[in-house]
Amino acid sequence: MNINLAIDRLRELLGEEKVLTAPEDLYVYGYDSSIVYTGRPWAVIRATSTDDVVHVLKVADEYSIPIIPRGGGSSLTGSSVPVNGGIVLDLRSMNKIKVYVDDGVVEAEAGATVDEVDRECRKYGFMFPIDPASAEVATIGGTIANDGGGMRGARYGTMRHALLAVEVVLPGGKVLQLGSPVYKQALGYELAQLIAGSEGTLGVITRGWFKIVPLPERLGRILAFFNDVEDAAKAIFMIRRRGLNPLILEFLDDITLQAVESVYKLGLPQAAAAVLADVDGPHESIERLINTFRNIFEEFRAFKVEVALTPEEMNRIYMARKAAYPALSKLYPVVIIGDICVPISKLPQMVKAIKSIASKYDVPIAAVGHAGDGNLHTFTGLNTASGDEWDRGCKANDEISLIALELGGSVSAEHGIGIQKKYLLEKEIKYRGSEYALEIMRQIKRIFDPKGILNPGKLFD
Amino acid sequence: MVDPLNDLRKYVDSCKKCGFCKAVCPVFRSSGYIETAGPRGRMLLLQGLLEGALKPNNYLSRRLHCTLCGYCSIKCVSGLELTEAYLIGRHYLLSNGVVLPGIKDLISNVVSLGNPYGVGSGIKSMWIDFLEERPAKESKVIYFAGCTTAIRRPESAVAAYSLLKSIVGEVAIVEDEPCCHSPLYLAGDWSRFKEGVLKVIKSIKNAGGSVVVTTCPACTRSLREYARNVGVEHDLSVYHIVEYLRELLNQGRLPNLELEATITYHDPCELGRHMGIVREPRELLNRIRGIKLVEMKASGLESNCCGGGGLYLPLDPEGSMSIAINRLNDLPDGVKYLVTACPSCEVQLSRAVQTVNLDIEVVDISEIVWRSLSRSN
C-alpha cells in the first residue's frame, strides 16, 4: 500500500479541491457524533458524483486502502469514524433530489439530508416517511446504511421499509442498482434490503429510491401524564391492541420530564411518565380519534390530558418531547444514548428494569422514545467520559441491552452497530443460538468486499 | 482578560458533537459542506488546539472564520454560545502571531485610518454635507454613525440623524468620529480594541454625550458588550436606533408616520440573535400607517444570515455573496422594500439584489421611518 501514490492519483482524477490532506481536516474528519470513538484518516475525498466514487473505489482497490463512507457524520455508534486510517469518502455534496409525484417515489443522492428530502416531498403534498431526530444532519446514505428510523417508525418502520432500490459502488468501481423504483418486486434475494443496515461495509451507497406518503389532511396531538409508569405503558399497548395506528406514539419517563421542566420551564406537571400521540386523517375524523385516545389514557388513570388541534398548540405540547435530548444535554456534559427495542407488551417491565439498573449503578438514566414500536432510548447522564463514573454508565447501558434481549427484544433498533455495539450484536446472535448467522454475514462481506477495505472495524470483526 | 485556552475548555468539553449546528450554518453550506468549515468542525479545531494535536496556523485560522451569525448556538443541544468560543479561538490565534492577510489589512486600516475600509476621514464625514444644517458639536444625545453607515450607506446616516433631530431636538455627532473598533475585537486583537474603545468613549464624553444612538449593531455591541468583555466599564447609555425609536414610541413622542408599501424585514444576526432585538423593529414598522409587513420565510431568531458579518467578507467575498443570494430565497412575494437595521446587511443584500436582478429596494429602517415621517408631515 502506498498512500501517497494513491492520493496523487486521486488528485489527478478528481482535482485538487476534492482531496483534503491538511492535518486540520484530517483531525476533524476523525470524529462523528459518537462519544468516545476517534481516528485519523490519511485523506478525505469530497465526492460530487457517482463517477467520483467509482474513481475512488478503483484506486482504493488497487492500493488496498480502507474507505470510510461518510454522510452527515451523525452516527452515535462510531460508524463513520476512521479507526484504522484510510480515506474518508465524504458524500455530503451529492445531494440531488427528484420527486416522481405520479409514482409516489423520491430519488435522492446519498448526501442529501433526510430533512432536505422531506422538504422537497412536501412541495408536492407528500412527506418522507422516515424522520430521525437528526434529520437535518443525517443523510440519505447514512440513514440507509444504519437503517435509521424515527418517531414515525410506529407506522412506517425504519429506512429499509421505505427503500425500493439503491445504487452502490463496490471495490474496483463496479456500479450496481439493486432493486427497482416500484412498490412490488420479486427478484430473488433482496439485495437492496441487504444494503440497509450494512453500515458501508458492503458498498458505498450513492443514491436511493423510496416510497413517499401523502401529507395528512389534518393532524391532532394529545399528551397524557401518568402517576404510574406501568399505566402509561399499558395505555401504549392498549392503543395498539385496539387497532389504532397513530402517526407517532412517544413515551417520556419522570427523569426526562423533570429535566425538560428544569431547563425549559414549560409548566409540565410532576409525573411518573407521559405519552404523546399524533393522530392524522380526514378533517372530520380527528376529534373522534383524539377522544378515543383520551378515553384510553383516562382508562389507565392519566391524571392530566392535553389536546392540541392548531399548529401553535401542537408546537407547544410537542416541546415536552422535542426538548428531551437538549434538556438532558444541558444538564449532563456526557450522555450515553441507548437504543433498544422490546415487544410492546414488555414495555412496563423494561422501564422498571431501567429504573432498577440506574439505582444499581448509581447513575441517572432517562428513558424516552418511540414506544409505539417498542423502541426506547436511554440517556445516561454523566459528568465525564472516563474513570469510574464512565465505567458505571457503560455497564448500566450494557445491562439494559441484555434485559431487552431477555424480554425478547433487540440490542439495536435504529442507531446501527458501528463500533459501540459490535459485541452486543454478537451477544444477541449467540443468545438466539444462531452463531452461524454471524458466519453468513462474514461470508457475504467477503463476496462484496474481498479485500476488506470497506469501513473496516465496524459491525463485526 | 481570559486565559484563552482555559476559557475554551468549558465550550469544548460540553460540545456533544451531535452536528445539529451544521444544518443552519451558512458558511458550511457555502463551503460545499466541508465538515471543517461548519460549526462542529470549528469546535473540533478548538479541541485540537486545546489538546495540542493542532498548531496555530493560517489554514486553521481560515477554517475557524465564519460570519459569526450565531444560528449554530440556537441549534446547540448543550446551549453553548458557540460564537464566543470562536472569538476566543481567534484571540488565541492572534496572540500566537497568526493573522490572516485580509484581516491584517483591516486591522491596519482601523488603527491607522480610523475605519476598516482604508478611506480618509474626509470621506467618512462626507454624509454630513447632505444634512440641512451642520450638526451640533455637543449634546447629551450623540448619533454615532459608524464606519459602514457613514462610508457605505451615507443616505442611512442622513436619514437617521435627521429623524433623531426632528424628534429629540438637539443631537450631536462626534467630530472626526472614530471607529467603534469592533473589527479589532472580532479579529481577536483585544488589547488594541481596549485602547480603541477607550478613545471612542472619551470622544463621546468630550462631546457632552451620555446617550449614544447608533445605526450599526456592531457599534452598539462594541460599546455595550465588547467593552465590558475587555474590562472597560462606562456610564454611557448605548442604544441601537431601533431600541431608541421604540422607547420614543412608548413615551408617545413618535409623530404620525405614513407610507403605503408592502415591506419585509431582514433580522440582522447581531441585532436579532445576539442582542435579542426582534420585537422592537416590528412594533416600529407596524406603527407606520399604510405599511404592510410580510415576514420573510425565516425570521427572528431563526433568520438566515446575509453573509456580511464576522469579518468573513474580506476572506471569502464569493462565499459571502452566495450566502446573501441564498438569503433572498426567503423573500415573500410582492414586497417593494426589504428593510433591515444594519448597514452591513444593507450593503450585502443590496449587492445580492443587483446580482440576481430583483426589483426590490433594500433600505435601512431609519430611512423607512424618515420617509414615512417626511411624507406624513
Image (tube, rainbow, N blue to C red):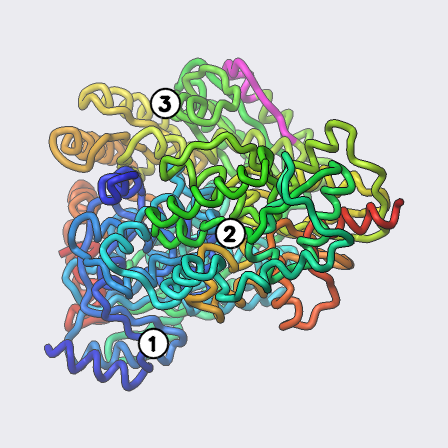
Amino acid residing under circle 1? Glu
Q: CA distance from mark 1 to mark 2?
A: 42 Å
Queried whether the magenta region covers residue A306, the answer comes back as yes
To which chain does the residue with label 2 belong? Answer: B
Q: How many C-alpha atoms fall within 10 Å of the one at disc 3: few (<14), some, or many (≥20)?
A: many
**Badge 3 is on which residue?**
A255
Q: Residue at x 34, y 47 (%)?
A: B190
Q: Which mark is residue A17?
A: 1
Whole-percent x and y of residue A385? Answer: 19, 37
| Quadrant into which the C terminus of chain B falls | top right
Nearest to the observer: residue B333 or residue A35: B333
Whole-percent x and y of residue B8? Answer: 27, 42
Nearest to the observer: residue B336 or residue B132: B132
Amino acid residing under circle 2? Pro
Q: How many C-alpha atoms fall within 10 Å of the one at disc 1: few (<14), some, or many (≥20)?
A: few
Q: Which mark is residue A239?
A: none
Q: Quadrant of residue B65?
A: bottom left
Q: Residue at x 31, y 50 (%)?
A: B91
To which chain does the residue with label 3 belong? Answer: A
Amino acid residing under circle 3? Ile
Q: What's drawn in magenta, residue-wise?
A: A296-308
Q: CA distance from mark 3 to mark 2?
A: 54 Å
Whole-percent x and y of residue A329? Answer: 35, 34
Q: Is label 3 or label 1 in front?
A: 1
Q: Is label 1 or label 2 in front?
A: 2
**Badge 2 is on which residue?**
B178
